[in-house]
Image (cartoon, helix red, strand yellow):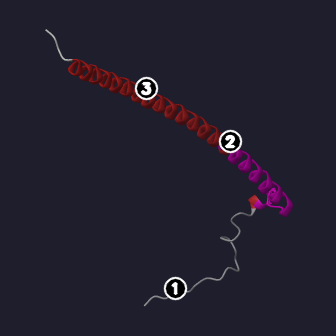
Amino acid sequence: MFIRRSTYLRLIARAEAYAQDARDARRAKQNADNQIARMAALADVRQADHDQTIAAMAADLDAAERRAARLKAQYDHAVGLDNPSLDLGAHWQTRRTDKPRTEVTTS
């Protein structure tokens, strides 16, 4: 069976168009896959950076708490709050004889 040259050329052009569409679809899928892979790699890098930042902040907080404790101990020593005689008189306010008392009236 014979076909016209114009029909043959139309069929060839349609086949080429389908082939080109298939190549474009494969290329688009590869680009999408590559983009997803890049985004996943970037997310991993950001997560690692976030973890490092959190670890550094925790270390800074520990150092600041140690420094605050050391400064508090120095202050307590400077003003005499670490004197053992203070512990002996911890409850002197409750045992004061000159402490003003409120009168209780009964009606």
Q: Give whichever of 13, 73 is nearer the camera.
A: 13
In the rendered image, residue 59, in percent from the top left (x then y), is placed at 69, 42
Q: Amino acid at mark 2?
A: Ala
On the image, numbered disc 2 is attached to which residue? 56
**95 left or right of 43 in image:** right
Of the 4 image quadrants, the one containing the C terminus is bottom left
Q: Residue at x 68, y 48 (%)?
A: 61
Which residues, given as a range, are shown in magenta? 58-86
Q: Which mark is residue 30?
A: 3
In the image, what residue type sits under mark 3? Answer: Gln
- The crowding category of the residue bearing disc 3, from other C-alpha atoms within 10 Å (few below 14, some 14 to 19, many at least 20), is few
Q: CA distance from mark 1 to mark 2?
A: 61 Å
The N terminus sits in image quarter: top left
10 above or below 99?
above
Q: Which mark is residue 104?
A: 1
Cα separation between marks 3 and 1: 90 Å
Residue at x 81% of width, y 59% of height: 75
Q: What element does badge 1 sit on?
A: loop
State the SS at label 2.
helix
